[in-house]
Amino acid sequence: MSVPKSATRIGMLTPSSNTVLEPTTQAIIDPLPDVTAHFSRLKVTEISLNARGLAQFELTPFMQVADLLADAYMHAITWNGTSAAWRGFHEDEVLAKAIEDKHGVPATASMLAINATMRADGITRFGLVTPYNDDVQTRIQQNYEAAGFTIAAERHTGVTTNYDFAEIEAEPIRKMVRDVAAAGPECIVIICTNLRSAPLVAELEQELDIPILDSTSAVVWHTLKLVGARPSRCGRKWGRLFERDS
């Protein structure tokens, strides 16, 4: 795909029941007049390990919505979602390669962004925070352990309906982060792009003196880096990650 020159366009594959990642992405890139964000939704309503829940994240629906974004000549296409955390990190690698091969632009995903950042920073032991149920949380921990990471501590809320994650208020999120911080992790990872956690990162990093990677803001940072848009221009209000460009 030949991409016309104009504003840098980043395309986000978005879960259909997500009400958080679009306004969060727009808020993050607001200081960048040369970057625009565009969204295409795929059907996602529940986060579970049953057949219905897992089938939402097959490759075909991803590629169908990526094709729609490609019609508008994106400079990068991103899966702003965390399904690979429980389905297996290789799922995001397969998706990114399929998008890159078909559309000729860089592609990434929330879990690729988080894991690449931790590996680049030499982090192997972290605290895990999610809103997911017991089965999904256990699978995420197993996948990270298989990838060579250690979970210092974890907290989760036990919710299954994707829409409901956005209804979790700030204070319960802060409490989960503080709880895992007590274990002294090298960083804290918040997984779920429909959780209103990104605006809390900077204040909690300052309070706890521990870096925090939020799945929504981390993938925006990573996507901006891929297109050469210098994410540090977004400002420090999004946490330590946005103080750097690599």
Image (cartoon, helix red, strand yellow):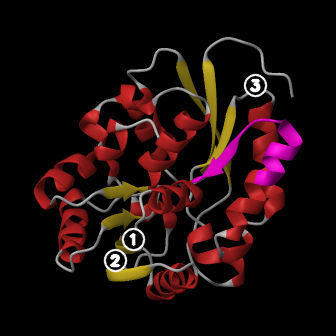
Disc assigned to residue 72: 3
The type of residue carrying mark 3 is Ala
Q: Which residues are magenta?
A: 97-109
Q: CA distance from mark 2 to mark 3?
A: 38 Å
The type of residue carrying mark 1 is Thr
Disc assigned to residue 130: 1
Where is residue 189 drawn, in percent x and y?
38, 65
Please identify the quarter of the rendering in which residue 9 is found.
Answer: top right
Disc assigned to residue 157: 2
Residue 157 seen anywhere in this rendered image of the structure: yes
Q: Is residue 178 above or below residue 12?
A: below
Q: Residue at x 23, y 47 (%)?
A: 202
Disc assigned to residue 79: none
Q: Nearer the viewer, residue 111 or 65?
A: 111
Where is residue 207 drawn, in percent x and y?
11, 56
Mark 3 Cα-neighbour bin, 10 Å: few <14, some 14–19, many ≥20: few
Where is residue 226 drawn, in percent x and y?
60, 37
